[in-house]
Each structure stands twice: as C-alpha cells, then as structure tokens.
C-alpha cells in the first residue's frame, strides 16, 4: 500500500502517460486502488467500446452490460461510462436479425460527448425491430441537422421528446448485406453534421444509392473530407477536392474498379 501511496504523489500528467501504456487487465488492477487512480483509468478503459455487441446472453461483454445497467437504473449509478466512450462497434455477424436496442444507442448518442467513431454491420432487412438510428429523429425532432454537443442531459426517458445535441460523430463505417441503404443514409444526412469520414459498403443491394440524400449528407457535413462507396457497380473514393465538387451538384466519380462482394 505504501508503494501505491508513493506512486500516487507523482504528477497527474506523468501518471496519465504511465497508464496509457497499460493493457486493460492491468488498468483494471489499478482501478480500485484509490480515487485518483480510478479517475485516471476509467477514461482509458472505456475509451474504445470496441468489443462487439452480442445482444443479451453470456457473450455480451461486461462493458455493454454496464451500459444496460445504467439504463435500468435510470442513470442513478456511480458512473455513467458513456461519457468516456470514443468508439463503438455495433456489429454482430453471427446474428442476421441483430440490431442494437434503440434505447441503448440513444443513451450513447446523448451522453457520449466524446463519441467520435461508430462501426456497424447489418445482414438483412429487419421486419421485427425498429431501425435503432431512428432515435436520431427523437433526439432532434425539430432540426434538419444536429450541432456538436455541449453538456449531456442528466437522464434519458424514451417516453419523452428530446431536443438536444448528439455525440460529435466524426467517422462512420457501415457494411450492409441485403439491406437497403435508403433509411440509414437519410437519417445521417438530416440529423448529423459532424462527419469527417464515411465508409459505406453495400453488398447485394436491394435499392440503388439514395443520391439526393447522399448529396445532402455531403452538404450538411461540411467537414467531411473523405468518403468511400463500395457497391456492386464498383469502388468510388471521394477526397476533399471531389467532395467540394459533389456538394456543388457535381457528379459522383465513375467506379474505379469492379468490386466483388465478400461472401456471407
């Protein structure tokens, strides 16, 4: 204990540098040593919620279960871990019907003031569940596009109408198998304006790209400087110059090469 006390007297900047080089198991060992260690390690442990969300069941990672617990207890837990998360992976290739619960996603978008990157994957159209990203309409029901967050609300009620900024999402990666991109593109075009990078893979598409909404997405996200589109037509890559032209009603570039969808 005396060694821990001595280490705790080191400058905060030095402790942050030391902790940044530790893996998750070692960070967990430091977590409960004292209040200072807790405050420095929690943001590092929760920085990347990269463990894939598996839905309910034994394979659900602990961190996702804790997010669910926060919702069950109406935010009255010791720490709302969502405020530390910078990246989430909402993919689950082992469940064709998989969709992250809308309430969970809404909580992350509202409280994740550091959330910069989202990765998700759908394997087929869902007739059972609502599209989780429909919560973007609920968060900003009266807005055409969102604005970067200031401070998150203290709690979230799915029964109430929300009108608050969302997480400053900068990178979005979508992979759609047998799923129409129309609704997803429309939601992000109308309710997000912080994107800097978009990667969209459409496999075995049911509908063509929604070109009007795709252009609206580029216009509403003025910081967007890199967009990759992979469809059965081929691969298109738009960097800053091409995006400036596209926003000004220019055409999408011709596909660079024939693109072969991955096997499911």
Image (spheres, rainbow, N blue to C red):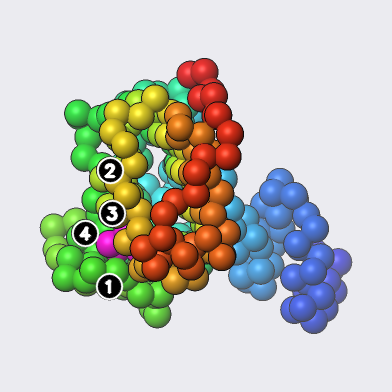
Q: Earlier in the sequence, mark 3 or mark 1?
A: 1
Q: Which residue is mark 3?
A: 212
- Front position in the image: 35 or 177: 177
Distance from disc 2 to disc 4, alpha carbons, whole Å, reads 15 Å
Residue 238 rendering spot, x and y as whole percentages: 54, 54
Q: Which residue is mark 1?
A: 164
Q: Earlier in the sequence, mark 1 or mark 4?
A: 4
Q: Which residue is mark 4?
A: 137
Residue 138 in view of the camera: yes
Residue occupying the point 24% across, 50% down: 134
State which region is magenta: 188-193
Q: Secondary structure at mark 1?
A: loop
Residue 145 rendering spot, x and y as whole percentages: 29, 69
Q: Secondary structure at mark 4?
A: helix
Q: Is residue 216 left or right of residue 94?
A: left
Image height of 163 relative to 258, above or below: below
| Marker disc for residue 131 | none
Image height of 109 relative to 123, above or below: below
Other-residue count near label 3 (Cα within 10 Å), few / some / many at <14 / 14–19 / ≥20:
few
Residue 19 is inside the magenta segment: no
Disc 2 vs disc 4: which is toward the camera? 2
Distance from disc 3 to disc 4, alpha carbons, whole Å, reads 19 Å
Residue 107 rendering spot, x and y as whole percentages: 34, 58
Q: Which residue is mark 2?
A: 182
Other-residue count near label 1 (Cα within 10 Å), few / some / many at <14 / 14–19 / ≥20:
many
Disc 3 vs disc 2: which is toward the camera? 3
Disc 3 vs disc 4: which is toward the camera? 3
Disc 3 vs disc 1: which is toward the camera? 3
């Amino acid at each position: 204990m005396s060694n821990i006390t001595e280490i705790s007297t080191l400058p905060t900047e030095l402790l942050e540098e030391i902790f940044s080089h530790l893996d998750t198991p070692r960070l967990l060992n430091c977590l409960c040593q004292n209040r200072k260690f807790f405050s420095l390690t929690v943001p590092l442990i929760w920085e990347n919620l990269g463990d894939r969300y598996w839905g309910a069941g034994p394979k659900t990672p602990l961190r996702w279960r804790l997010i669910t617990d926060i919702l069950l207890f109406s935010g009255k837990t010791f720490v709302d871990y969502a405020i530390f998360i910078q990246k989430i992976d909402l993919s689950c290739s082992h469940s064709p019907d998989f969709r992250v619960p809308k309430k969970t996603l809404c909580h992350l978008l509202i409280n994740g003031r550091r959330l910069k990157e989202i990765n998700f994957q759908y394997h087929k159209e869902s007739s059972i569940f609502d599209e989780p990203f429909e919560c973007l309409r609920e968060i900003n029901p009266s807005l055409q596009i969102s604005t970067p967050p200031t401070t998150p609300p203290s709690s979230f009620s799915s029964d109430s109408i929300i009108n608050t900024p969302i997480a400053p999402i900068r990178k979005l990666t979508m992979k759609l198998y047998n799923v129409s991109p129309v609704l997803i593109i429309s939601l992000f075009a109308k309710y997000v304006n912080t994107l800097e990078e978009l990667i969209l893979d459409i496999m075995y598409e049911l509908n063509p790209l929604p070109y009007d909404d795709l252009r609206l997405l580029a216009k509403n996200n003025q910081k967007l400087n890199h967009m990759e589109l992979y469809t059965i037509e081929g691969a298109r890559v738009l960097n800053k110059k091409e995006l400036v032209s596209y926003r000004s009603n220019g055409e999408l570039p011709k596909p660079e090469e024939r693109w072969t969808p991955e096997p499911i």
